[in-house]
Amino acid sequence: MKLICVGRNYTEHINELKNEKPENPILFLKPDSAIIPKKQPFFIPDFSNDIHHEVEILVKITKVGKYIDQKFAHKYYNDIGLGIDFTARDLQSKLKAKGHPWEKAKAFDGSALIGKWLPKSDFNDVNNINFSLLKNDTEVQNSNSKLMLWKIDELIAYISQYFTLKIGDIIFTGTPAGVGKVNANDTLTGYIEKNEMFSIKIK
Ligand code: ZN
């Protein structure tokens, strides 16, 4: 299985990193080796001094699809989750400056936290989901899926033009504003509405 991640999907996050608004969704992949095993902490890797948290809504694919029409995209997922796209921001900045791929900064071992899942049927509208991230009990990120530049069904249609979606693949739908550095002994806790979706320690 693969993780398909979307970059720059919330206007305020684009502004905070002084990036340009893209014409199309920015996509990158993480391998399955990026996934943090259940109940394990996040270990700060030796190659970075500036690991950022990016909380993101996740979508789990339940049906194989290629060239999926946006109006049928809702048939390809049943579960909504929350996770973190851990990013080595210092390394990413160097790679971006050279025009190199982001993988070392985005797809390293332990760079993907996948929390619990909620059935899509729990939501009246997947384009109106509140979610947030707390760092040591202080809220650092808070947004709503209605603020995505490209909504879930649009993303599925777009992604499937390039990558066949397979059962178990997970889409990271992009992060809102409020990304920031994590330090050893921090605890990150993520919520969708009032549901705690994960809590992870940084080591
Ligand atoms: Zn991200």
Image (cartoon, rainbow, N blue to C red):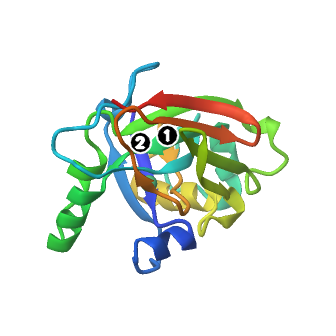
Question: Residue at the location (47% across, 37% down)?
Answer: 169
Tell me which numbered mark, 1 or 2, is placed earlier along the sequence. Answer: 2
Tell me if 143 is positioned left or right of 92 in this view.
right
Question: Residue at the location (33% across, 29% down)?
Answer: 203
Using the image as rendered, state which of residue 165 and residue 66 is in the foreground: 165
Q: Give yes or no for contact between labels 1 and 2 (Cβ–Cβ under 8 Å).
A: yes
Using the image as rendered, state which of residue 106 and residue 156 is in the foreground: 106
Looking at the rendered structure, the kind of residue marked 1 is Ile
Q: Is residue 109 visible?
A: yes
Query: Where is residue 117 drawn, in percent x and y?
Result: 64, 30
The residue carrying mark 1 is 170
- Disc 2 residue crowd, few under 14, some 14–19, many 20+, Cα 10 Å: many
Which numbered tag is attached to residue 3? Answer: 2
Q: Quadrant of residue 180?
A: bottom left
Position above or below: 187 against 130: above
Question: Residue at the location (60% across, 46% down)?
Answer: 138
Q: Looking at the image, how many numbered discs can be counted on the residues?
A: 2
Tell me if 174 is positioned left or right of 43 in this view.
right
Q: Quadrant of the N terminus?
A: top left
Question: Residue at the location (56% across, 54% down)?
Answer: 156
Looking at the rendered structure, the kind of residue marked 2 is Leu
Query: Where is residue 155 drawn, in percent x and y?
Result: 55, 59
